[in-house]
Image (cartoon, rainbow, N blue to C red):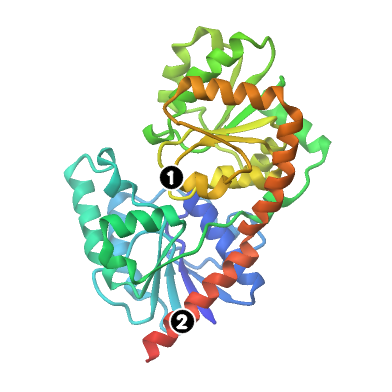
């Protein structure tokens, strides 16, 4: 099959959507599928290269993004079998080629704070009108599917669930020299090392994590918390300023490459993820693949990913976080057992097998369209 995939969303900083696009293209390539990128002029996709070989660029402006999703995407090549839009967007019309849209989550429809102004409300109203024109929707978790069934039951009959994948880099070993080089570069010095990687908007709940770590460190003379990608985040800086006891114990890094992120996972003694709402929970899945003990929020999407291979706690309870982090750091035998079982479980998220499930969906969609 020849598949076109919309890569217009890829920009300067790595996001979950970019990670998803890269992994999917990699997996499809391994399945023998030709993938053409659209939305980025004159750039071929290189599945084995970082960022698929796409050059860095600033994020598209809202107007540019709006124009592409309303009109530009209609120019999809006519010599492909199917167009996959790997994020929640579609024109308000049926396209000339069959189309598949990935629904990562329903955050803007579930959480009011993500549609505060009239522009955001208009944009998401457009999404509500547009998605029924896609031939097929893919939800990345049963949790997202449950949200679709509750909020937009009319979409459910055209939606299948295919979980997110984990890029093969997270399953690879990293040698000690590389770990030492990367940790020195970012100023990491102490153990036990607690790592967080993810976003820093309100639903990510990093404030609860910081408060919990302040209590954890009261009883531990050593150790550090690493917040990946938080260096320029004013909200995080403000929170850290309120906890003088954390001075020198919290390391904030800039955005990092996938290679450095994999290495930081390998350097950690514990991975923590306090999010209140996710469509999937890719960082906990990555941590399981690397082999890092996981303490994460007990919410449906993450419960679906982590299962019994990590410790799940109430995202709003500081006391629960303090207890869980302390227990995991004090119980290396338990942590090691979870790591071994978790790595085996993470193989379910290998992109090579996930992509074959997409290929089955693509074939079914093309068959239906051709009648």
Q: Which residue is drawn at 54% across and 53% down?
A: 19
The mark found on residue 364 in the picture is 2
Residue reaching furthest left?
Answer: 118
Q: Which residue is drawn at 55% across and 49% down?
A: 305
Q: Which residue is drawn at 49% across and 49% down?
A: 16
Question: Where is residue 273 drawn, in percent x and y?
Answer: 53, 35
The mark found on residue 151 in the picture is none
For residue 52, what is the image quadrant?
bottom right
Residue that badge 1 annotates: 278
For residue 323, what is the image quadrant?
top right
Front in this rendered view, residue 28 or 143: 143
The residue tagged with tag 1: helix, strand or loop?
Answer: loop
Residue reaching furthest bottom?
Answer: 371
Q: Which of marks 2 and 1 is nearer the N terminus?
A: 1
Question: Where is residue 263 drawn, in percent x and y?
Answer: 70, 39
Q: In this view, does 35 lie above or below 220?
A: below
Instruction: Give the quadrant of the N terminus.
Output: bottom right
Q: Which residue is drawn at 74% across and 44% down?
A: 340
Question: Where is residue 281 drawn, in percent x and y?
Answer: 51, 46
Instruction: Give the quadrant of the C terminus.
Output: bottom left
Cα–Cα gap, marks 2 and 1? 28 Å
The residue tagged with tag 2: helix, strand or loop?
Answer: helix
Disc 1 crowd rating (10 Å Cα; few below 14, some 14-19, many 20+) is many
Does residue 13 appear in the picture of this structure?
A: no
Does residue 304 appear in the picture of this structure?
A: yes
Disc 2 crowd rating (10 Å Cα; few below 14, some 14-19, many 20+) is few
């Amino acid at each position: 099959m020849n598949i076109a995939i919309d890569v217009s969303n890829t920009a300067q900083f790595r996001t979950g959507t970019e990670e998803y696009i890269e992994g999917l293209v990699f997996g499809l390539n391994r399945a023998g599928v030709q993938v053409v990128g659209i939305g980025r002029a004159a750039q071929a996709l290189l599945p084995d290269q970082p960022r698929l070989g796409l050059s860095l660029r600033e994020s598209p402006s809202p107007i540019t993004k709006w124009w592409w999703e309303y009109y530009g995407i209609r120019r999809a090549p006519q010599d492909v079998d199917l167009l996959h839009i790997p994020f929640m967007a579609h024109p308000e019309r049926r396209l000339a080629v069959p189309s598949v849209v990935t629904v990562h989550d329903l955050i803007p429809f579930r959480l009011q704070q993500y549609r505060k102004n009239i522009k955001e409300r208009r944009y998401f109203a457009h999404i509500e009108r547009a998605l029924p024109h896609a031939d097929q929707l893919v939800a990345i978790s049963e949790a997202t599917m449950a949200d679709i069934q509750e909020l937009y039951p009319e979409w459910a009959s055209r939606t299948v669930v295919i979980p997110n994948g984990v890029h093969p880099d997270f399953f690879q070993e990293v040698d000690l020299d590389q770990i030492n080089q990367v940790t020195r570069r970012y100023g990491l010095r102490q153990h036990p090392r607690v790592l967080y990687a993810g976003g820093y908007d309100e639903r990510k709940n990093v404030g609860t994590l910081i408060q919990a770590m302040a209590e954890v460190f009261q009883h531990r003379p050593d150790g550090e918390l690493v917040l990946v990608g938080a260096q320029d985040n004013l909200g995080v800086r403000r929170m850290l300023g309120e906890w003088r006891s954390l001075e020198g114990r919290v390391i904030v890094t800039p955005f990092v490459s996938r290679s450095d992120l994999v290495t930081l996972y390998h350097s950690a003694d514990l991975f923590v993820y306090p999010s209140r709402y996710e469509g999937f929970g890719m960082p906990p899945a990555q941590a399981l693949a690397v082999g890092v003990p996981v303490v994460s929020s007990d919410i449906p999407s993450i419960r679906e990913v982590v299962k019994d291979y990590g410790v799940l706690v109430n995202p709003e309870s500081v006391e629960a976080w303090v207890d869980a982090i302390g227990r995991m750091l004090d119980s290396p035998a338990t942590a090691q057992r979870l790591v071994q079982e978790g790595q085996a479980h993470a193989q379910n998220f290998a992109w090579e097998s996930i992509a074959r499930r997409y290929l089955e969906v693509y074939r079914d969609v093309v068959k239906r369209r051709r009648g």
